[in-house]
Amino acid sequence: MNTDVQTRVETVLDAAIARHGVGASALLPILQDLNSILGYLSEDALRRIADQAKVPSAQVYHLATFYKAFSLKPRGRHILKVCLGTACHVRGAPKVLDELGRLLEVAAGETTKDGAFTLETVNCIGACALGPVIVIDGQFYHAAPGSIEGLLRDFLAGKAEAIPTVGGDETVTVDERTRIQTAGVSVAVCGGTGCQAYGCEAVADAVAAQLAGVGLADCVEFVKTGCQGFCEQGPIVVVRPAGILYRNVTVADVPEIVRLTVVQGKPVERLLYRTADGQTITKESAIPFYAHQRRLIFGDNGRISPECIDDYIRKCDGYAALRKALAMAPETVIETIDKAGLRGRGGGGFPTGRKWWACRQARGGPKTVICNADEGDPGAYMDRSLLEGNPHRVLEGMIIGAYAIGANQGYVYVREEYPLAVKHIRSAIRQARDKGFLGVDILGSGLDFDVSVNRGAGAFVCGEETALIASLEGAAPEPRTRPPYPAQSGYKGRPTNINNVETWANVPVIISRGADYYANIGTEGSKGTKIFSLVGKVVNTGLVEVPLGMPLRNIIYDIGGGIPGGKEFKAVQTGGPSGGCLPAELLDLPIDYDELKKVGSMMGSGGLIVMDEDSCMVDVARYFLHFLLDESCGKCIPCREGLRQMCGILDRITVGDGAPADLEALEELAPAIVDGSLCALGRTAPNPVLSTLRYFRDEYEAHIREKRCPAGVCTALIRYDIDAETCTGCTACARKCPVTAIAGERKKLHTIDQDICIKCGICREACRFDAVVRT
Amino acid sequence: MEEPKTICFTIDGQEAVAAPGETVLDAAKRLAIDIPTLCHHPGLEPYGACRLCVVEAFREEHSTIVPSCIHTPEDGDRIETDSERVRRTRKVVLELLLARCPDVEVLQRLGDEYGVEAERFPVSTTGDWQDKCILCGLCVRVCSQGVRRNAIGYAGRGGERCVTSPFAGRAEACIACGACVFVCPTGALHVEDTDTERVMVEIGARLPLLACRACGRTFTTQASFQLMHQRQLIPETTLCTCPDCRRAETRSLAEKVLTGQRTATSR
Ligand SMILES: Cc1cc2nc3c(=O)[nH]c(=O)nc-3n(C[C@H](O)[C@H](O)[C@H](O)COP(=O)(O)O)c2cc1C
Ligand code: SF4
Ligand code: SF4
Ligand code: SF4
Ligand code: FES
Ligand code: FES
Ligand code: FES
């Protein structure tokens, strides 16, 4: 081994140990540091870690092979990740992966021969509204199948970022200036992850530069906000108080926005939102996507700069709820939360007040509270957007909770795919400390409480509370049997209360507005509002917040604008990977915890993935089961081996080798997996199969009996042919086919060589005459 | 301090009691009710991985399937160890295990007991020793909790999970004590002695053997001896005597005591 390399490993390791200390609970952060700085974890590095951090090498090796974020092999100069999350899956991510694999001549997990690229996959990066998404060196790109080659070429050519243009000689009159000042004009540019993928950074820089250039920097407020929810239309710019919303803004549009809208108060027509029938809508509040929402928790995201505590305090009455809570008895705080009827937003829907009571009453200490920001459900990204866009609200909730429970230590466990969320919650913690909202004797109340941030490393099961606690402790993130519940014995055996990000964010709202106000929103058993991630095959994708109990139809059609391209709605998948697929007959279902359970699905963290006629429900079930098998910790047999068999059966069905007995086998396996598994991952894993069998059995039958995939997704069961009558010989298909399976001369009939065809369907999209037919 | 309270409940209709912290399995054993287990060992922390020990726990009208090796009962619980739902769950667990490990005798025997017919699921063997491993984790736990060496562990997750030495190489911390081989319920792990070395076949460790001070035969590894010695568990002379000689010595000591030549405590 090269001594330079060894010294470098030593240096990085020394620094990591200096930062994180030694012992099991420092192990994960140390591995993360080395993996990110050195690019991978060599055996030599892992041995040194074991040695110096004083952890058995068996444990180091287990963690290094458990978490997906770690690579044990050297990687290329650029890391290219394809999102295979649900939202991206239904919009063609598997094809994107195939195409990249073909272009780079590597399989997922491999590095190109020249060492330029390593191709990896990831399960959701929280930019679901934009799917399919790829990430190159941390930058997000929307990757339509068929456009990948150009994207890679641009990337390699280092196509320069657009530079903000500043119209230098514009002037603002005194009158205009006065008007701006009295009106209190502000420009909010969304700086959320989704908009970043569309280049909002450059737009934001351009707005700031332009405002400065025309001498308005001192009287127009410029805010770079977190995600506002309407990501697909990004970059989003909102000018207030008029409330004019612009979408798909580019750097070139900025001077005009400043000139017309900021200075003169007039809209720039072409940047306004347009309805399907071409009408423009000026005001943000009138856009159907927003008009039907009730943004109790999420609304402030569009108004504040997430890295500025004063913004939060001034505009959102921030930390007023904390003061109010500290003046109450801790028991009264819990009663208020209980009376409001808040249920956990992380999936289980457990009453939050009751959970707090249990932890408050538990013996032992010091007590711990945890914010679960592992957000593993692929296709859901509300937790990311809350932490990125309004971290103080989450933090304020945690401090109130700590006071109510009597906890002194807090942790925020954020998944590793969310670097911006980590940055913002860290800066929020620092600022809150400076203001005395964290630390010793908070606001003179006698409460000592502080919070630190830990990152996950790519493991869905870490969202499960007992696995999360194990992960924090540096043990293998395997769930353990409850009881004891974390409230009795959690982190390091201490009474621990764990809540989801959105749950915490609801707390200050309830304290400020009172339990009755909150309990008036929602249904009998599900109170308040819920943020849903409306993604997949729907016109307006994004984050929507509505009162619980709103029918699915209103969300998908009134807010989401229905299904694009004149296609037919087929199903909406709710509840994350172990949720269920609901058919059109259930569109009038009021969405709440109990109703969803009744129909064989669940709330999960609030993903709503809409599917149209082009989605195959057997393929969807197969997708989720493979996801769950891959993400299972592998500890218990019903989950590990049961899912393995279910995956095998579904694989067989989708390639045409299914038999009628397979459906019986699935139906017999399911209850044993549900009953027998150790944690809720296994206990709910059969849901996707059961719900698709319940509502879409005919599709299974078609695959098994007729060897036919009605949606045309399962490649083994479809073929593409060119219709002799309609083909004009334009050559469009042949030029696009990535494997040159199409032959034919100009103006003559083209044909597809079935032995070469990989059934990507690109030819069908390329043909303007609908001559390519799928059967 | 409050009095530790005894918990009263029933198992298969029989009155049962458990001290706080005791599991259903503990209580069932006292009543001589047989519950099959694969990943449980009384000397190690319960793990809850194999799910063969599941029982049905009724609380009022509601019932759930719980692992008896971990589940601690509450007053008034009604436990059924052989209900329809229990048998069905155990049967599927065994079918799944037999698809993974078709050649393991204990599984075949249990499979017969639970009515597993010709394999319904395709056998997914890999051709290496792992085909006999059910990932019960007993070996890993005995090595960490009992021997306290942490010489072996797991790698991967989900369907890829396996038992392995670190870096899939030689288990450097292994002292070849053989405890893992001893607890393994399926015979997946093996130990082989040469004239001078003990070889942990699957774990990849070879350690020099120690000869008995009395008869000269090799019987344990030097490393195991040292560990026991360090922990002062057993006096050195006893330790470096092989079990046969130790028995012989004890016997002769006993005879001497009985014939009045010595007292038992003098050496
Ligand atoms: C496999 C699995 C994954 C989970 N992932 C998450 C997650 O990403 N975020 C979350 O808040 N809760 C997740 N949960 C639920 C947590 O275990 C826990 O119930 C929740 O954090 C409690 O918070 P709440 O009461 O505020 O909902 C998951 C549960 C399971 C079984
Ligand atoms: S159910 Fe799955 S994820 Fe949960 S403990 Fe068992 S193997 Fe692990
Ligand atoms: S033989 Fe080695 S691996 Fe097995 S228990 Fe003993 S020390 Fe651990
Ligand atoms: S080797 Fe044996 S003891 Fe170890 S996990 Fe496998 S079956 Fe269990
Ligand atoms: S970003 Fe791909 S599914 Fe979320
Ligand atoms: S990231 Fe800008 S609206 Fe979501
Ligand atoms: S013996 Fe109880 S789960 Fe294995």
Image (cartoon, coloured by chain):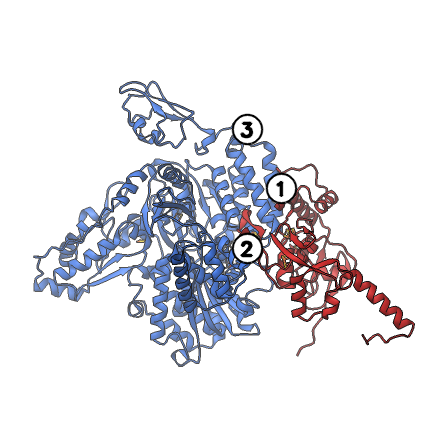
Residue B136 pos. (x, y %): 64, 53
How far apart, in angstroms, are the residues tagged by discs 2 and 1?
A: 38 Å
On the picture, is B146 further left or further right than A458?
Answer: right
How far apart, in angstroms, are the residues tagged by discs 3 and 1?
A: 20 Å
User: Regarding mark 1 in the picture, which secondary structure is present there?
Assistant: helix
Q: Tell me the mark number nearer the camera, choosing from 2 and 1.
A: 2
Label 1 packing within 10 angstroms: few (<14), some (14-19), many (20+): some
Tag 3 and tag 1 share a subunit: yes
User: Regarding mark 3 in the picture, which secondary structure is present there?
Assistant: helix
Task: Give me the chain letter of mark 3.
Answer: A
The residue shown at (59%, 35%) is A662
The residue wearing badge 1 is: A668
Residue A327 pos. (x, y %): 42, 78
Which chain is depicted red? Answer: B
Residue B176 lies in what quarter of the image?
bottom right
Which chain is depicted blue? Answer: A
